[in-house]
Image (cartoon, rainbow, N blue to C red):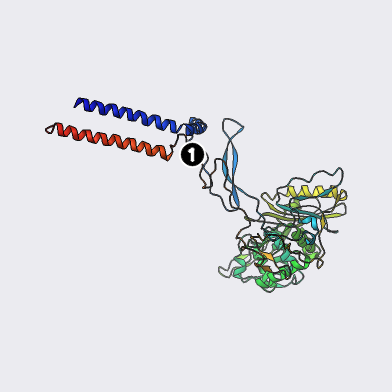
Amino acid sequence: MSTTRGRYKVACWAASLALVVTLGYAAQPALARAAPAAVVGSKAMARGASPAAAHPTPSCQEWQTVTLVPRVSSRSASPTDGVPQCRNAPPKPFHHIAWDPDTVVGGPLLARSGVIVQAGPGVPDLPTVGDVSYVLADLDTGEILAAKSPHAWLRPASTLKTLTALTLIPRLDPKQVLVATDEQVAANGTRAGMIPGNPYPVRSLFEAMLMLSANDAAYGLADAGGGYDKTLALMNAEARRVGAFDTLALDPSGLDEPGQHSSAYDLALIGRAAMALPDFRKYVSMRDAVFPGGTSRRTGQVYRPFHIPNINRLLGNYPGAIGVKPGRTNRAQHTFVGAAERHGRTLIVTQMGSTTGSWKSTAALLDWGFANAERVNPVGRLVSPGEAIAPKTLRDAPVTATGPALDPATGEPTTALHTTEAPASGTPRPAAASGPIAATGRVELDRPFPVPSRGVVGGAIIVVSLLIGAGAHLARRRRHDNPHR
């Protein structure tokens, strides 16, 4: 009996040794790969923080992306490892059917993407700005001094109110009075503070819409112009009249609607046409205005008239600034139409897709334009109202568009030219991060220990099963040899 137990112990020790050697040998490449991660993990643990908890990945909004931001430790002023944080991402332009470059409104060079400039000798480079698209042009002559992806389709945000004003100012008497409705007062976003049942002069509504970017005032003006739908139809017709074939208006306030889009070139056309209206130019250059008060029908409380400011920061920071209109939504990010005068020249600049909206980038483009307007060859021009026709489709181009388009013949929105419907957002979702940030939103760490292959694990299971079987057999033999124990 002792001989049997001895043989069993020897067999167990031999099998265990074989199992350890087998697993260790099979996992040797995995160990080599995991060694650096194990070292990093041990250093993180030495600092008192677990690797998994060091960089939790936040859940971002669809217009944001995960960015690794350097972290400065309390013991050192130098940045250490990056911390994933949500940051606003530049919007992605809508895709659309390719146009024949020779028919692109403003000139064939404007069909290009990226920075477009024809600088003479000694002209410095254009300032680097964070805009997805821009146009810098002479407001009087229409000559475009420089541009970046000028016909890219992007969300205009509240710069679309420039088109609303261009459409309605010639049609409405500024002394006309509108009675505010509950629907106008309930507008999303920025509001002037209209009170249902109270009268408001059209002039005050234009001031609030263009200076404060008030959406309640925009809807009030739309109703004064014949109603929401009629005003949109008039706006799209006006866009086609001035040659803005990249523009599709779906909300008179500029708030994001699926498929609503414009371009830096179109905003320059619209802004130029609007600045030709004396009332518009007066509204956008005002620094302050008084908005009417009123009486609440529900509570009877009386509200006194109050001051509204012009939120265009260029006016108070750039000498010679005369307008025009800023805008921002989450999906559009910052958009802007600006104008300034200097030494007898007036420039207009339009910008789309900035994540900062800083007036300093506008000032940098204007400074470059004023300094170099005589030393550059125009890359295109802003067409006059009624001059341009819709660009022609490049018939042999593949149909890969995902955004809405305008029918080249009628200018109306159509889906016939597209393989898919317009997406709800023209902004990219957070991209799957590379490196330590996994697409699942979790921090992926290299394993600090090897994981054997399925074949090795299967062999180990067989060895263990044999050992268990041998032990059970030995136990039965012992019970058979000594039944009274």
Q: Is residue 151 left or right of residue 35?
A: right
Q: Position of residue 363 (x, y in %)?
A: 77, 49
Residue type, numbered disc 1 = Ala
**Which of the 4 image quadrants contains residue 80?**
top right
| Residue name at image x 56 percent, y 69 percent | 298
137, 220: nearer the viewer? 137
Q: Eyeballing the image, is 66 above or below 163?
A: above
Asked if one can make out residue 138 in the rendered structure from this viewpoint, the answer is: no
Q: Position of residue 469 (x, y in %)?
A: 27, 37
Secondary structure state at the residue bearing disc 1: helix
- The residue tagged 1 is 52
149, 367: nearer the viewer? 149
Q: Position of residue 358 (x, y in %)?
A: 70, 49
Q: Residue farthest to the left?
A: 484
Q: Quadrant of the C terminus?
A: top left
Q: Is residue 191 left or right of residue 479?
A: right
Q: Would you call the spot at circle 1 few (<14 residues within 10 Å), some (14-19), or many (20 or more)?
A: few
- How many numbered marks are there? 1
Q: Position of residue 380 (x, y in %)?
A: 82, 56
Asked if one can make out residue 418 in the rendered structure from this viewpoint, the answer is: yes
| Residue name at image x 26 percent, y 29 percent | 8
| Residue name at image x 18 percent, y 27 percent | 1
**Which of the 4 image quadrants contains residue 167?**
bottom right
